[in-house]
Structures are given as structure tokens and as C-alpha cells.
Amino acid sequence: MSRQNDVAPVIIIKRKKIVKGGGHHGGAWKVAYADFVTAMMAFFLMMWLLGATTESQRRGLADYFNPSIPVHRISSGGEGMFGGTDFETRVQDGPASPDDDDSESSSSDQAEAESFADLQQRLNGLGGESPVLDNALRHIVTRQTDEGLVLEVFDLPGAPLFDNDSDEPTAVTRQIMLVLSQVFSMVINPLAIEGHTRTYTVVQANDPRWTLSMARAEMARRLLDEEGFDATRMARVTGHADRRPSVANPMAVRNNRLELILLRRTPR
């Protein structure tokens, strides 16, 4: 037998390594995770924006993307304690059909009520800015009526608005009128000023109540005018003497007051 037959055959084994996608070796999960993180960032950014904006600003954004009623804004400018905050009054442009009268009136009433509510919140939020401002705000209360937004400015015990039963304003009255002039510049409603006095024990020969209430209302108008209030918005200036007391005791100093009324543009 030949030598070649004595050699054992060589067996060669081939192992094929198969690399499968997925698991930690693939990249698809990274794309999905990046999309998830992006969506979460967008969600938390949206939540932060909702918390950082006011109701007025959110309504403005909603109106921008769904402008069913055009929005006309009145800005207070870049200076002053409100820093240029915009207040809005919604008005319907163009002629309205009779069928739209009721809905238009309802929308205008709601917009005006919301604007008044915003203004009240802004005014109430001024507390804490300075001791002088805090002292002035103690003399003011606000309320909404069918006539409009009433800002009642009144005497406090030991802190009158005018000196010695006269029409000479005290320092706190001048500060109040400065504040209110900036507040009133944020809306376009006409303004009415009404003066009221307490009852006096003795009816004097020259009864001061009528002349005093009128003189104080006129002084308030003049102080607002000095602070730049638009005189064309002044609707009326009246005095009511002691005929409309604010509290049960007609002689209480709380009845010495001014009522500044932002009149509704759509009377009820």
C-alpha cells in the first residue's frame, strides 16, 4: 500500500458568526428615547408657560390662534408701576346683523367684566411694593356694579383725604391719584367722579356739605389731569353731600369719600 493512504484526512470546520440587530447593539432605541425626552421637555415647557402667564395673556394667545373677535389692546407704556402691561377691550369690527346683536352684546359684556377683574387684581397686587404705596392702598376698595367698576377712596380715622374739612388734598390723596392715573391709563372706559361727605351735627348758615362734596370731586379731577389723565374721557363730576352714606352712622368719617367710576361702554 502506498504511503499516501496512511495520512489521515484533514477536516476543516467553518463557524459563521451571525450578528443580529436589536438589543444593546442596535441604534433604534436611541432614536425612540430621544423622541421621548424631547416630548417630555416640550410638555414641561408648556406647563411652565401656563403657570408663568396671566389669564389675560392666555386669552390673548387663544385669540391670536382663533381670532373670532378682533382684539384691540391699550398699553400703559413702558414706564410706571405696571411696566407696560396690556389690557384688552374686544370690539366687533364692521356692521353687525340683527341676529348677531345679542351674542355681540354678551361677548362685549364678558370682555369688559374680565378687563375690570384684571384691573382689580393688578391694583390689589400692588401691596408690599413700598410703605407709602401700602398706606395709600388702605384707603381704596373696589367693586363692580351695573354702572361700571367703582374705586372708592375714603377717609380713615386719623388719616383724612383732605385737610380740616376743606378741599385741600393731603399727601396720601396725591399719592392715590398718581396710582389711579396709571391704572386708568390701562383701559379706555370713560370716568365719572362723585364726591360724598359725612353728616354734620349742626346745620350751619352756609351748609358746607354740597359745596364741599363738589369741590373735592373737582379737586380729584384736577389731580388726575395733572398726572396726565385724558380729559376727553371725563364723563361727569358731581357732589352728593351726605345723601348717600356708605355706613350706617351718617357722621362716621368713612362717609367722607370719593367714588371714581370706570363706566361700562356697553350699559346694562
Image (spheres, rainbow, N blue to C red):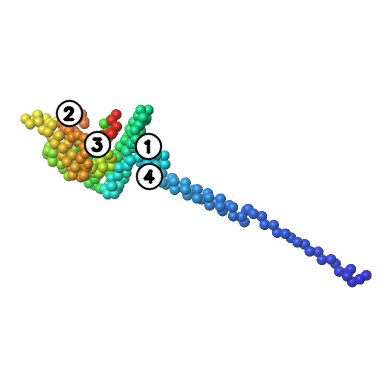
Please state the total of marks drawn on the protein image: 4
Left or right: where 187 falls relative to 199: right
Q: Which circle marks residue 40 in the picture?
A: none
Residue sitting nearer the eye, 209 or 187: 187
- Residue 37 lies left or right of residue 246; in this view the side is right
Measure the C-alpha gap from mark 3 to mark 4.
28 Å
Residue found 62% across the figure and 56% down from its top: 25
Viewer-proximal residue, 125 or 3?
Answer: 3
- Distance between the Cα atoms at labels 3 and 2? 24 Å
Rounded to the nearest angstrom, the CA distance separating label 2 from label 4 is: 44 Å
Gap between marks 1 and 2 measured at Cα: 43 Å
Above or below 96: residue 32:
below
**Label 3: few (<14), some or many (≥20) within 10 Å?**
some
Q: Earlier in the sequence, mark 1 or mark 2?
A: 1
With respect to residue 102, does 181 lie above or below?
below
First-in-chain label (1 vs 4)? 4
Compare residues 184 and 266 and report the one nearer the observer: 266
**Label 4: few (<14), some (14–19) or many (≥20) C-alpha neighbours in 10 Å:** few
Q: Mark on residue 69?
A: 1
Amino acid type shown at disc 4: Thr
Q: Which residue is mark 4?
A: 53
Mark 1–mark 4 Cα distance, whole angstroms, equals 21 Å
Which residue is identified by label 2? 243
Q: Where is residue 159 drawn, in percent x and y? A: 18, 40
The nearer-to-camera label among 1 and 3 is 1
Q: Which is more N-terminal, label 2 or label 3?
A: 3
**Image depth: mark 2 or mark 4 in front:** 4
Q: Secondary structure at mark 1?
A: loop
Q: Amino acid at mark 2?
A: Arg
From mark 1 to mark 3, how far is it between C-alphas?
A: 22 Å
Residue 190: mark: 3
Mark 3, secondary structure of its residue: loop
